Image (cartoon, grey):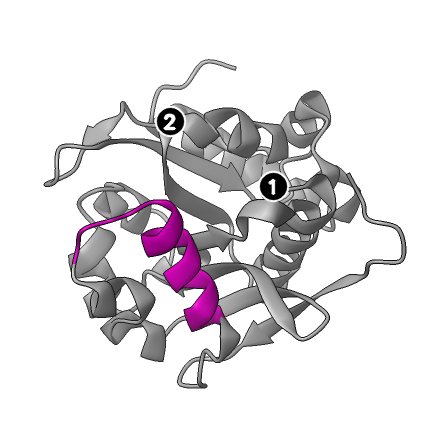
Amino acid sequence: MKRTGDQVRARRIPPGEALGDVERLRREVYFHEQGQQRDKSELIADGLDGSGTVIAVDSGVQAVASLRLHDFSAPTVQVEYGQLFQIDRFASAWPLERVVVGTRLAVQSDRRDKQVVDCLLEATYRYAQEQGIRFGVVACDPALHTLFEYYGFREYLPPAILADGSAVLRMVLVTDDGPHLHRCGSPLQYLILDPTAGATARAWLMRTFKLAD
C-alpha cells in the first residue's frame, strides 16, 4: 500500500558511476534477507557494474529498489548471459543493441509495494524506449513469475537450471507490444509509443520461439 506522504522517485546510474546506496540495498537483500552463500563482493558489485545502467528508486535519501541493465552488444554480456537466453537467435534478426538483460534486482523487504515496483518498472521501460530496445529478458525466480507476468513479461523458453542447481524462468518483455500489455492489464500499457514496431517484434518472437498467443 502507498504510504501517506511518502514519495518515491527513479533515477539512473550511468555506466562507471559509483553505485552508492544501491550497494547497501543489495547487501541487505542478498545476504541479510536471502542468506546467499556466493562471494559477497561479487553480488554487491562485479565487473559488469562498470558497463551497465542501474535504475534505482529512492525514498528520501535511501535506495529502496534497483535493477541493472545491459544490452547484448558487449562481448562480456554475451559470454555471461548469451547462452542462457539463446541470444544467437535474436542476433540472427536484430542488432544486439536492441536486446537488454535485467539483472541484480533488489527491492527492500518493507518496500515491496505497488508504488515502488511500478516506479522501478516504469523507469526501466522508459529507458528501454529511449534506447530503442525492443526486447527485455530476465532470469526470473519462479516465486516472482506472477509479478513479472503482470507487467507484461512472458516465458519464451523452458525453465533453465543454473550451475548452483536453482531453476529460473526465462522471460521476455516486448517493448510497445500493445495487445499483450493490454491483455495483462500491465501498468506499462499507458507508456506505449510505437505499437507498429512492437507488433513487428512480437510477431518475430512468437514465430521464432513457436509461442502460442
Task: Look at the picture and state if 24 lies above or below 193.
Answer: below
Q: Nearer the viewer, mark 1 or mark 2?
A: 2
Badge 1 amino acid: Gly
User: Residue 84's image quarter?
Assistant: top left
Q: CA distance from mark 1 to mark 2?
A: 26 Å
Name the foreground residue: 103 vs 79: 103
Which percent across, then down, holds residue 157? Answer: 30, 27
* Residue at numbered disc 2: 142
- In the picture, the disc for residue 24 is none
Circle 2: element type = helix
- The crowding category of the residue bearing disc 1, from other C-alpha atoms within 10 Å (few below 14, some 14 to 19, many at least 20), is many
Q: In this view, which residue lies farthest toward the left?
A: 163
| Above-or-below relation of 170 to 132 | above
Rendered view: 141 above or below 5: above
Looking at the picture, how far across and down is residue 154, in whole percent?
A: 47, 28
Q: Where residue 198 is drawn, which disc sits there?
A: 1
Q: Magenta stretch: give its range.
A: 22-38
> Of 54 and 207, which appears nearest the observer?
54
On screen, residue 40 versus residue 9, left or right, reads: left
Q: Nearer the viewer, residue 94 or 17?
A: 17
**Vertical arrangement, residue 100 with respect to residue 178, above or below:** below
Q: At numbered mark 1, what does the secondary structure look like: helix, strand or loop?
A: helix
Q: Nearer the viewer, residue 74 or 119?
A: 119
